Structures are given as C-alpha cells and as structure tokens.
Image (tube, rainbow, N blue to C red):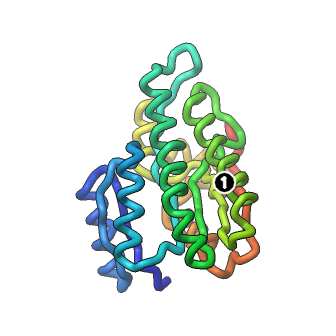
Amino acid sequence: EGAFVVVTDTNAENAHKVAADIVASGGSAIAIPADISSESACTDLIAQAFELRGQIDILVNNAGIMRRGNILDISVDDWNDLFAVNINAMFHLCRAALPHMIAGGGGAIVNTASQWGLHPAPNCIGYNVTKAAVASFSQNLARDYAPHNVRVNAVCPGEIHTPMLEAGAKRSGRTIADLDALVPFGRVGRPDEVAALVAFLASEEAAFMCGSLVEITGAQPVA
C-alpha cells in the first residue's frame, strides 16, 4: 500500500524471498537478515532501516517461537528462548524505533500477540505468558506514546495455517484438517487474513485505534 518495507528474519533466504515477492507484486522492499534475539542486532537493524529512508513510520513485530510444556517440564533454555524472541526483541526494536517516530511526528506499531495470551491453552505456559506480555506491553506503550501520535495495537491470532502450526499438529499426531474441525468458522485462518488486519491497523484508516487487542480466531475457543 505504498510503504517501503524492510524485511528481517534470522534465515537470510526467507528474508530475501519475502522482499523479492513484495517487489514482484509491485511494491518496494529490501531484506536485512538479523537475529533479533540480540539487543545489538535490533539496534543495528533499526539504524539501517532509518538510513535507507530517513524515517520510520511503521513497525510490525511479528517474530515468534513456540515451545510447549507446563512449569515442571519446560526447560529453562526454552523459557529463556521464548522471552528472548517473543518479548525482548519487541522491546529492543520498539525502544530503537520510537525516537525516530516521535521526531517524525508519529507512527504505528503493530505487535503479534496470540489468542493464547488472552485465553491460555494447557501445557504451553512459556508461550502463553510471553504472548500475554505482548498484549500488556502493547497497551502500556499505547498509553505512554499516544500523546506523541504513535499508535500501538496488537493482533491476537488463533490457529493460522503457518509452518509453526503444521509442526505443532504433526507433533501431536493431528492434521490441519483435524484443526479445521475445531474452528466454528470451519477452517483455520490464513496468513494473508492476518496480514490484511495488520495492514489496516498500520494505516490511517485505523487512525483512532490505539491500545486495541484485536482477536482473529474464526470464533475458536481455546480448549
């Protein structure tokens, strides 16, 4: 929709593919691979993005990992990894981007939380807690920076057909069709449906939305 997009991923091939797809569809994009579990990588990424255009208007925090387990069987390494990627990376990226947004007169931040952060699923304590933290972080940031014309919102997806969902289904001996049957809407969601919601929240059409946690679940309850 007219934005110059900087795509990042720990996997350089994936980052370049997404950027190439955006360009092929008529958009403008560049890939800057980075391991955003590192504070310095987050700071460098925002600095490089700012140098490209001299402004940062939109930040979408979509990186996330899943590790299952209750408090007695989740490993400390998995717990720390969940916080490093799902929470700390978002913190460092927002911290680096906000001064540029404020100096530019405002901006929009969209964070990816989860339905499970609002309605916890069993045996996923680390993931649930980090996604609940994303939701709280988003609302806190919204309250603090709305006076600077920076809007912060979060999307809270349910089951979306991604490689993460496929891997989780396989581990539990289920198929995507099995998961489709659990959703009142009759199917799991598509990534492009979540992307459309993110684009809306980042756009001027959502100019009065700030501090919202928007669920996109197909009416699916958490079992």
Which residue is at the front of the view, 67 or 98? 98
Q: Quarter of the image holding residue 207? A: bottom right
How would you rate the neighbour count of disc 1 (Cα within 10 Å): few for under 14, some for 14-19, many for 20 or more?
A: many
Which residue is rendered at x = 39% and y = 79% of the image? 53
Task: Identify which amino acid the numbered label 1 is placed on.
Answer: Ser
Q: Is residue 15 left or right of residue 104?
A: left
In percent of width and height, residue 75 lies at 46, 20
* Residue 218 showing in the rendered view: no
Please state, as top left, top right, bottom left or bottom right, where the C terminus lies in the image.
Answer: top right
Q: Give the residue at mark 1.
A: 138
Which residue is rendered at x = 47% and y = 21% of the image? 76
Q: Is residue 168 left or right of residue 26?
A: right
Which residue is rendered at x = 56% and y = 71% of the image? 101
In percent of width and height, residue 4 lies at 41, 79
Which residue is at the front of the view, 82 or 47? 47
* Residue 37 showing in the rendered view: yes
